[in-house]
Image (spheres, grey):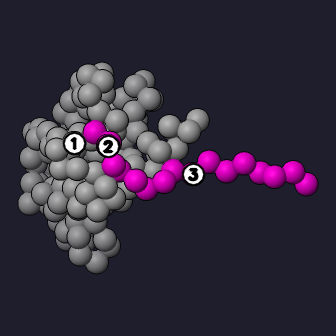
Amino acid sequence: MGHIKTVEGQLDAKGLKVAIVASRFNDFIVDKLVGGAVDALTRHGASREDLTIVRIPGAFEMPLVAQKLAASGKYDGLVCLGAVIRGATPHFDFVANECAKGLAMVSMEHNMPLGFGVLTTDNLEQAIERAGSKAGNKGVDAAMAMLETARVLAQL
């Protein structure tokens, strides 16, 4: 039996230039996600000077803004953060689907590691749980997924 080569991403954010795209809609939730993402990246070696927070209206606008950021060549990764809450968002399914599809397209087209931290919940309580209380902080999760993916891509 031969040796199996394994490629893994080291969780070192040192020198990484990251744009954090954050929707203003449900900002009391999104601000907690942003805080989690910034904290996770800086704890893993990113400097605050290498992080840029881009505020946008909502999740529907996110793919266009992410595409512009990815095409700029200024960033090594994106972390996209928002909260689409069924009870609060008209056309919930449409907004959530278009956001996810659009961001996946941007990531693929630009070979851009992208942390997806757009909450899609049935109610406010679930969103609050995913933004730093019971269920952890999805901003942290999105930042860490982007970081690990960036470090894996660099080895391929």
The amino acid sitting under disc 3 is Glu
Q: Which residues are magenta?
A: 1-17
* Residue where numbered disc 3 is placed: 8
Picture coordinates of residue 32, whole percent (x, y): 16, 62
* Residue where numbered disc 1 is placed: 50
* Residue where numbered disc 2 is placed: 15
Mark 3 to mark 1: distance in Å? 23 Å
What residue is shown at x 28% (from left), y 51% (from top)? Answer: 46
Q: Is 35 located above or below residue 118 in the figure?
A: below
The quarter holding residue 90 reads top left
Is the C-beta separation of discs 3 and 2 under 8 Å?
Answer: no
Q: How many other residues sit within 10 Å of disc 3, few (<14), some (14-19) or many (≥20)?
A: few
The amino acid sitting under disc 2 is Gly
Picture coordinates of residue 82, whole percent (x, y): 21, 50
Q: Which mark is residue 129?
A: none
Q: Secondary structure at mark 2?
A: loop
Number of marks in picture: 3
Q: Residue furthest right?
A: 1
147 or 102: nearer the eye? 147
Residue 18 visible in the picture: yes
Q: Earlier in the sequence, mark 2 or mark 1?
A: 2
What residue is shown at x 9% (from left), y 54% (from top)? Answer: 27
Q: Is 156 located above or below residue 43 in the figure?
A: above
Is the C-beta separation of discs 2 and 1 under 8 Å?
Answer: yes
The quarter holding residue 120 reads bottom left
Q: Main secondary structure of the magenta part?
A: loop
Mark 2 to mark 1: distance in Å? 7 Å
Q: Earlier in the sequence, mark 3 or mark 1?
A: 3
Q: Secondary structure at mark 1?
A: helix
Q: How many other residues sit within 10 Å of disc 2, few (<14), some (14-19) or many (≥20)?
A: few
What residue is shown at x 44% (from left), y 29% (from top)? Answer: 111
Is the C-beta separation of discs 3 and 1 under 8 Å?
Answer: no
